[in-house]
Image (cartoon, rainbow, N blue to C red):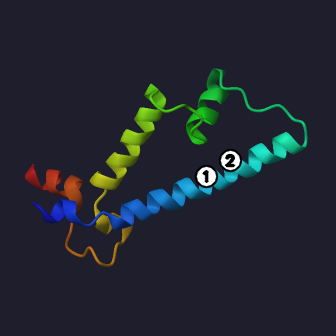
Amino acid sequence: MIGAFTNRMAAVLWVILTLSVVTVGNRIHYTYLALNNKPMPSGTGMKGVFWRAFFWRDERTTIPYDLWVIAILAFVWLTPPAWLRDPVASGQHGFLGWLLSLS
């Protein structure tokens, strides 16, 4: 059981990689808009929901921000290291694998 919670490094690295790439893309996009005097994306409507979610534009202590934090933590703690092909986590199935083995 304890082994299911020990090695989370592969998931943490995936989160860092993904958020870093999205952040750089976000900064490039907003810099392009600002330098070319184009309007910033609106935060309203369905398109605005995508922009706010994908580029994480919500302020801290808001429900959407908290949902993203919960999703990231769930990914880190529930994803079995074997799914991420973590070479040092052989034999570990993660919390999700442990839950599935109970049934």
Around disc 1, counting alpha carbons within 10 Å, would you say few (fewer than 14), some (14 to 19), or many (20 or more)? some
Residue at x 71%, y 26% (from the top left corner): 42
Considering every residue shown, the one lying at the far top of the view is 45
- In the picture, the disc for residue 26 is 2
Marks 1 & 2, CB-CB < 8 Å contact? yes
Going by the image, does 85 lie left or right of 100? right
Residue at x 44%, y 39% (from the top left corner): 68
As drawn, 58 above or below 13:
above
- In the picture, the disc for residue 57 is none
Around disc 2, counting alpha carbons within 10 Å, would you say few (fewer than 14), some (14 to 19), or many (20 or more)? some
Residue at x 71%, y 49% (from the top left corner): 27
The quarter holding residue 54 reads top right
Q: x and y percent of residue 28 in the render?
A: 75, 51
Q: Nearer the viewer, residue 57 or 102?
A: 57
Considering every residue shown, the one lying at the far front of the view is 60
Q: Amino acid at mark 1?
A: Val
Q: x and y percent of residue 78 in the render?
A: 28, 52
Q: x and y percent of residue 75 in the render?
A: 36, 51
Q: Amino acid at mark 2?
A: Asn
Quarter of the N terminus within the rendering: bottom left
Q: Nearer the viewer, residue 15 or 99?
A: 15
The quarter holding residue 51 reads top right
Going by the image, does 65 lie left or right of 100? right
Going by the image, does 28 lie left or right of 47? right
Q: Secondary structure at mark 1?
A: helix
**Pointer 1: what residue?**
22
As drawn, 53 above or below 16:
above
